[in-house]
Amino acid sequence: MSQHRVLILGNMDKPGVAEQIEKLRPWFAERVEVPGIHSADEPRWTGDKVDLCVVFGGDGTLLSAGRMMAGTGAPLLGVNMGKLGFLADFSVEHMQKHIEEVLDGEVQPTERLMLDISMQCSYGEAFTSPATNDVAISAGEPFRMIDLHVAQGPETVAQYLGDGLVVSTPTGSTGYNLSTGGPLLQPTLHAVVITPIAPHTLSLRPMVLQPSPPIRITARRVNPGTSVIIDGQIVQDLCDGHIVEVKAAEEPLRIIPHPGRHHFDTLASKLQWGQSPHHGI
């Protein structure tokens, strides 16, 4: 048996995932050591070092797995059992076909920027979390315009008046950032994009910045329902005077790319990016 240690993570609430993992259990056992099978939304991994995490689910499951494994350096291989499969790029069959190449180092992981998010209020630090895709601040009820001041180091970046903003990693640029009018970033760039949500001033456009020094977002005037949202999955209330700090994580996210396609192939196939319009119905 191989000495490689492979952790299996999955969205156990998604139909078919637990059954598929159970079906593959003997196949894994013949090839690698499996230290555990876990739900991808568990707290940070504190077990022994693993060589690979195979993640069963969809893109949301891989985002959860990214936060769970943050700081460990373990690469993630996403097996798509959802709809889009933009990050979870492998089928079960392709995972089985290529896993030996991955473990032998013939397929190298891509390194992606992750973020560390902390929120401070008058009594000190209240909340911290890694972010794989993005951190968004959303106005919430009663849906009045909110006022956010953004600074980086000693410099003011902008005052954002509107429904909020999204601070996205390059990996997350195809998500909420894209839907709010932000640009697509090559996933291996070391940069973040700040995209306003329904800005009061139409000249306020998305900005691409280095993530260092940390970006500080001060809530000057927000609504009772205003929230800080991590990867669309973790929600914290934001109040007047709270400060959200966004900085680059020390360890990158490592994702195993599908050896049969590159990033622009995935953009074209999943998002119909850069393709000619189809004629007819």
Image: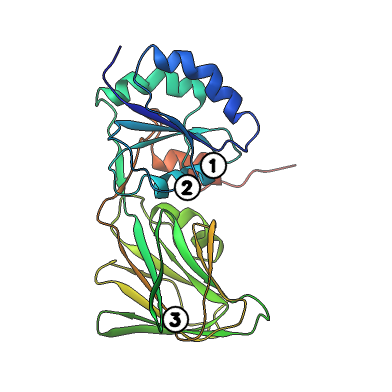
Residue at 61% x, 39% y is 83
Which amino acid does the dot numbered 1 rest on? Lys
**SS for callout 1:** helix
**Looking at the image, is 182 positioned above or below residue 89?**
below
- Precedes in sequence: disc 2 or disc 1: 2
Residue kind at label 3, given as amino acid type: His
> Quadrant location of residue 113?
bottom left
- Amino acid under label 2? Ser
Point out residue 203 in the picture as x, y percentages from the top left corner: 48, 82
124, 58: nearer the viewer: 124
> Mark on residue 253?
none
Q: Are marks 3 and 1 in contact (CB under 8 Å)?
A: no
Find numbered disc 2 in the image and state the secondary structure of the residue it sits on: helix
Q: Residue drawn 28% across and 15% down?
A: 2
The picture quadrant where one finds residue 14 is top right
Picture quadrant of residue 141: bottom right
Horizontal side of residue 137 vs 115, given as left or right: right
| Callout 2 crowding tier (Cα within 10 Å): few <14, some 14–19, many ≥20 | many
Residue 174 seen? yes
Q: Which residue is mark 2?
A: 64
User: Up-down: is 187 above or below 84?
Assistant: below
Q: As drawn, which residue projects farthest toward the bottom?
A: 220
Q: Which residue is mark 1?
A: 270
Q: Nearer the viewer, residue 238 or 125?
A: 125
Q: Which residue does the numbered mark 3 point to in the structure image?
A: 242
